[in-house]
Image (cartoon, rainbow, N blue to C red):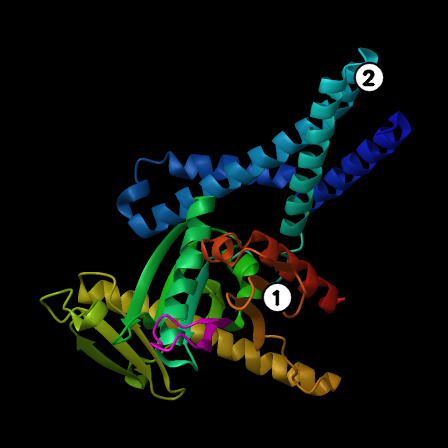
Amino acid sequence: MAVVDVSEELKSLSSTMGSIEAVLDLGRMRTDVAALEEQAAAPSLWDDPEAAQKITSKLSHLQAELRKTEALRSRIDDLSVLFELAEGEDDAEALAEAEAELISVRKSLEEMEVRTLLSGEYDAREALVNIRAEAGGVDAADFAEQLQRMYLRWAERHGYKTEIYETSYAEEAGIKSTTFAVQVPYAYGTLSVEQGTHRLVRISPFDNQGRRQTSFAGVEVLPVVEKTDHVEIDESELRIDVYRSSGPGGQGVNTTDSAVRLTHLPSGIVVSCQNERSQIQNKASALNVLQAKLLARRRQEDQAKMDALKGDGGNSWGNQMRSYVLAPYQMVKDLRTDFEVGNPQGVLDGEIDGFLEAGIRWRKQRER
């Protein structure tokens, strides 16, 4: 790479980094970290475990984001020194290392740039993810379970905490539905581009004739509700059913009726939670999910009104959005962004960052 080209490239990277730093507002981040550290050091912190968990989680996330941003700025600043030393000593090996670091920094910068695109009203929230089997019988149930594992593995790869609220198992294999939380800031903004219908094409392991089967699973992503959202639920509008939690094949998980199912009578929305041993805890978690669904419905109604005023017709991008093809060839393709990879197994094992980044950029372009 020519010296002039390198110089211009480094200037461009530094300029982009400056824009990212301005959007992230590092000064405010440092102030927020200091305030959270003070709260986390309070002797009474764990008197309220739920509030304490939120404080420590937010602090951990902000500290990691600040370190990551400062480290990337340092790497960009060090690049010019690496190239000067390599070219000054005419060292081909050192030059190759510098060029490899340049490629790595460019990729890291592109990933961080995506974070600055998450500026929606609820993007900074934690996320609730609901997956349900759709058309395709037992293959759809199996696919829904694969998608659940995909998102949980993605979260695990990034060190994000998750909590499964409810899983309804299918009789033969897989799951009918599941609801789980991804408990990290910006989980909603990141995962919201996954909402829609996912399609799987493969040779069915459940077909004794080895025929190719197409099956579908739906993904719904909701922002976790906060006190400022004012989603009030009148207890008189709820039907509350308690039952015994069950696992795969209908086996009992608990010996008490601790699982809770809430039916919101005015809207017909039904949510369940069976993760906790306590009926009270399960009811509280189910109420959180119900509030999130009611908030999402309110947002959809508001958006429909805006679309009607704009003559948009309410067209949504959240229908069929991705195909996973395992036979006769190997490919996963996003039908909105055209981003695709030839390694379905890697994707189903949680390697979905490329799809998330492409989806976030695509959504931002549509908003302009």
Distance from disc 2 to disc 1, alpha carbons, whole Å, reads 42 Å
Which residue is nearer to you in this view: 334 or 255?
Answer: 334
Residue appearing at x 69%, y 45% in the figure: 110
Neighbours of disc 1 within 10 Å: few (<14), some (14-19), many (20+): many
Which residue is nearer to you in this view: 71 or 233?
Answer: 71
Q: Quadrant of the C terminus?
A: bottom right
Which residue is nearer to you in this view: 162 or 28?
Answer: 162
Assess whether residue 216 is covered by the magenta stretch. Answer: yes
Taking 167 as reference, is 160 left or right? right
Residue 124 horizontal/vertical position (percent): 54, 55
Residue furthest out toward the right: 4
Say what amino acid the circle numbered 1 marks. Asp
Q: Is residue 1 above or below residue 267?
A: above
Residue 84, picture quadrant: top right
Question: Of marks 2 and 1, which one's residue comes earlier in the chain?
Answer: 2
Residue appearing at x 65%, y 58% in the figure: 358
Say what amino acid the circle numbered 2 marks. Glu
Neighbours of disc 2 within 10 Å: few (<14), some (14-19), many (20+): some
Q: Which residue is mark 1?
A: 334
Taking 5 as reference, is 171 left or right? left
Q: Give the dominant element type of the magenta stretch: helix, strand or loop.
A: strand
Q: Which residue is mark 2?
A: 87
Which residue is nearer to you in this view: 39 or 153?
Answer: 153
- Image: magenta residue range: 200-219
Dot 2 falls on a residue whose secondary structure is helix
Q: Is residue 350 above or below residue 330?
A: above
Residue appearing at x 34%, y 88% in the figure: 265
